[in-house]
Amino acid sequence: MSERTFESPVFVRAAEGLVQEIACLEDACDFLHEWPRHRRGVIYETATRACHRAFDGLVPLRAARDAFAGFARSAKILEDVSVAMPWMTGPKAGETGGVAA
């Protein structure tokens, strides 16, 4: 495990139907860098600053993760994956999971 890997990942809705796992500081910085300029604001700037300071060792990794999660929440892209998504649960008892002939 990298020293820049988050203790627990943050999941964000990157596009309609696409959930992206942000597992480390590099992922968070890349995501923030790609965020549209017209949607950036104070919370975005705070998250970016926290991530950059974590890279420099000035802020704990946990603080950068929390700042990124706060940004995602404010942008309404934070995904709650505590409930398993249908494709993650597998077939129900008695089902084979295949396509009916």
Image (cartoon, rainbow, N blue to C red):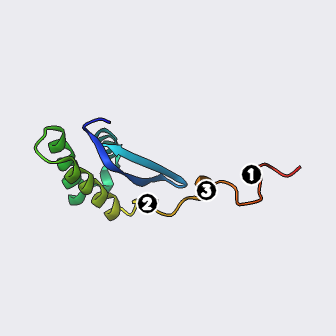
Q: Residues within 10 Å of mark 1 (few under 14, many from 20)?
A: few
Residue 19 locus on image (x, y percent): 48, 52
Nearer the observer, disc 3 or disc 2?
3
Q: Relative to residue 101, is residue 68 drawn left or right? A: left
Give the residue at x 46% y 62%.
82
Q: Say which quadrant the N terminus sits in.
A: top left
Q: Quadrant of residue 41?
A: bottom left
From the viewer's perspective, is residue 17 above or below residue 3? below
Q: Residue furthest right?
A: 101
Give the residue at x 30% y 46%.
6
Residue on which disc 2 sits = 79
Amino acid at the residue labelled 3:
Thr
Q: Nearer the viewer, residue 23 or 31?
A: 23
- Residue contact between numbered discs 3 and 2, judged by CB atoms under 8 Å: no
Q: Residue furthest top?
A: 2
Residue on which disc 3 sits = 89
Q: CA distance from mark 3 to mark 1?
A: 11 Å
Residue 63 locus on image (x, y percent): 20, 53
Q: Residues within 10 Å of mark 2 (few under 14, many from 20)?
A: some
Q: CA distance from mark 1 to mark 2?
A: 26 Å
Give the residue at x 34% y 63%.
73
Q: Relative to residue 28, is residue 54 drawn left or right? A: left
SS at circle 1 = loop
Amino acid at the residue labelled 1:
Gly
Between disc 3 and disc 2, whose residue precedes?
A: 2
Between disc 1 and disc 2, whose residue precedes?
A: 2
Label annotation for residue 97:
1
Q: Residue furthest left?
A: 58
Give the residue at x 22% y 51%.
62
Label annotation for residue 56:
none
